[in-house]
């Protein structure tokens, strides 16, 4: 009797889960897509994330742009970054492990950091500016598309929370430690 109740409970849970969410699909290239619920994000988050992607991977392939956006979102989801609860906190995080997103800051002469005059600040001003040339407009449009895709659930770097342009060095280090990595364009994600 207990087994029968347990089976019914499990089946009910499965049916409820399938009826309320889409199942995550893991493709061979480690891409995850979820579209169960309407993604919840603000225009500011799109602007911030797209501008960061523009600074970090503006002229990288589209796949690399999505990957950079996902390192931010993966930090928000990660228990390791338990002090980070939103996109803004992940981008501007200085609390632990240094700065991943260096365009977000400028180092002042006294050794502290400020966001004033940063590349990210400039990119955010440029985001909706009409003064961009055609190459910049195209790159920013791709960055916005990549940011939205990531915010809506597209993930091509699994749980990677960092990346580097030192591909050869990091690849050796990560391989020696048997850690996950993925190379996209001129970046290695881990």
Image (cartoon, grey):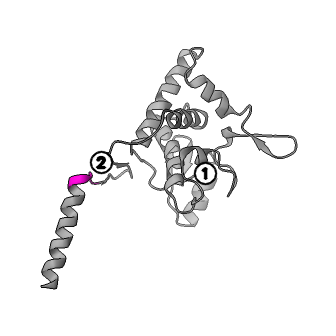
Q: Which residues are magenta?
A: 19-23
Q: Nearer the viewer, residue 56 or 118?
A: 118
Question: Mark 1 or mark 2: which comes first in sequence?
Answer: 2
Residue 68's spot in the image, x, y percent?
A: 53, 43
* Quadrant placement of the C terminus: bottom right
- Percent position of residue 131, x then y: 60, 14
Label 1's element? helix
- Does the magenta-highlighted stretch encompass residue 20? yes
Asked if disc 1 and disc 2 are in contact, CB closer than 8 Å, the reply is no
Which residue has dot 1 on it? 168
Left or right of residue 56: residue 39:
left
The answer to whether one can see residue 60 in this image is: yes
Instruction: For marks 1 and 2, give the CA distance.
Output: 38 Å
Q: Which mark is residue 111?
A: none
| Image: 132 above or below 33 | above
Percent position (x, y) of residue 5?
15, 78
Q: Residue at x 49, y 32 (%)?
A: 43
* Residue 59 position (above or below residue 15): above
Q: Main secondary structure of the magenta part?
A: loop
Look at the image and say whether residue 181 sits in the magenta stretch. Answer: no
Which residue shows up at 33% across the image and 48% down it? 34
Please tell me how crowded label 2 is: few (under 14), some (14-19), or many (20+) other residues with Cα within 10 Å: some
Q: Quadrant of the N terminus?
A: bottom left
| Disc ID at residue 36 | 2
**For this rendering, which residue is in front, 68 or 40?**
40
Q: Nearer the viewer, mark 1 or mark 2?
A: 2
Left or right? Give the position of 178 relative to 33: right
Indicate the secondary structure of the residue bearing disc 2. loop
Residue 160 in sight from this viewpoint = no
Q: Is residue 36 above or below residue 18?
A: above
Front one among 182 and 31 = 31
């Amino acid at each position: 009797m207990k087994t029968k109740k347990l089976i019914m409970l499990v089946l009910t849970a499965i049916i409820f889960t399938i009826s309320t969410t889409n199942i995550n699909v893991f493709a061979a290239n480690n891409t995850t897509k979820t579209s169960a619920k309407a993604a919840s994000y603000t225009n500011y988050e799109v602007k911030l994330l797209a501008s960061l992607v523009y600074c970090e991977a503006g002229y990288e392939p589209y796949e690399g742009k999505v990957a950079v956006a996902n390192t931010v979102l993966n930090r928000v989801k990660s228990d390791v970054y338990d002090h980070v609860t939103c996109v803004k906190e992940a981008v501007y995080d200085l609390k632990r492990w240094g700065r991943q997103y260096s365009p977000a800051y400028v180092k002042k002469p006294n050794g502290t950091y400020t966001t004033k005059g940063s590349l990210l600040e400039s990119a955010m001003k440029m985001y909706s500016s009409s003064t961009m040339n055609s190459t910049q407009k195209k790159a920013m449009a791709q960055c916005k598309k990549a940011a939205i895709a990531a915010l809506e659930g597209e993930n091509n770097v699994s749980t990677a929370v960092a990346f580097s342009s030192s591909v050869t060095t990091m690849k050796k280090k990560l391989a020696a430690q048997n850690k996950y990595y993925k190379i996209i364009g001129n970046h290695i994600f881990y």
